[in-house]
Amino acid sequence: MERDGRPVPVKFFRITPAQVGEVARKYGPMKPGPEDVLAGALGEDYETRWERFRASKQATARRPSGPEDPTERQFNEITSQLGDVEEATAGEAVSAQRQKMRGYIRQCGPKGATVTAIVLRLEMEHMSASDRTVRRWLSEDEARGVVEKVSHSVYRIRDAA
């Protein structure tokens, strides 16, 4: 800020991601808050947003996950080898997750969809499936002629060619 209190534009060159937090902590308090009327309209949810954010980050940090957790890794290895319950009990019936996966691939058209995009889309729909499970479904669907591999990790519906 200049001496008269006016903000001055600043450019940062060659700033590393590690420095972003330090800059934000130092200069963040200078950012003006919302007007009183808007702050009142936003209510308590707005005022407590950072406490909720910190609490969720702490809860996530405490929860073991990923390859470091041997129990989670073993569980994923076992479940990735299992077939779909619906397919085992109803012949050719397909799980809702798998139907959602096929629908998303169909929406992508001839260009196809990546495995990562499929996993993310299923998570957005609250129908999470692991990368390994999606790859297994795609491999099985490819063998059945439902999908085809366009390139490495990219699949499209067979009739979308």
Image (cartoon, rainbow, N blue to C red):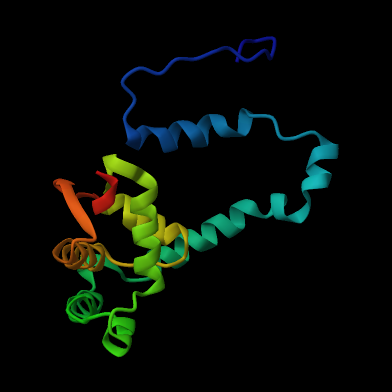
Q: Residue furthest right?
A: 37
x, y (%) of residue 139?
Answer: 16, 63
Say above or below: 16 vs 54.
above
- Going 32% across and 71% down the picture, which residue do you hit? 64
Taking 3 as reference, is 119 left or right? left
x, y (%) of residue 153?
Answer: 18, 50
x, y (%) of residue 145?
Answer: 18, 61
The answer to whether residue 85 is seen in the rendering is yes
Q: How many marks?
A: 0
The answer to whether residue 114 is seen in the rendering is no
Q: Quadrant of the N terminus?
A: top right
x, y (%) of residue 96?
Answer: 41, 71
- Going 69% across and 9% down the picture, which residue do you hit? 4
Residue situated in front as seen by the camera: 127 or 155 = 155
Taking 12 as reference, is 112 left or right? left
- Going 24% across and 61% down the picture, which residue do you hit? 146
- Going 23% across and 56% down the picture, which residue do you hit? 147
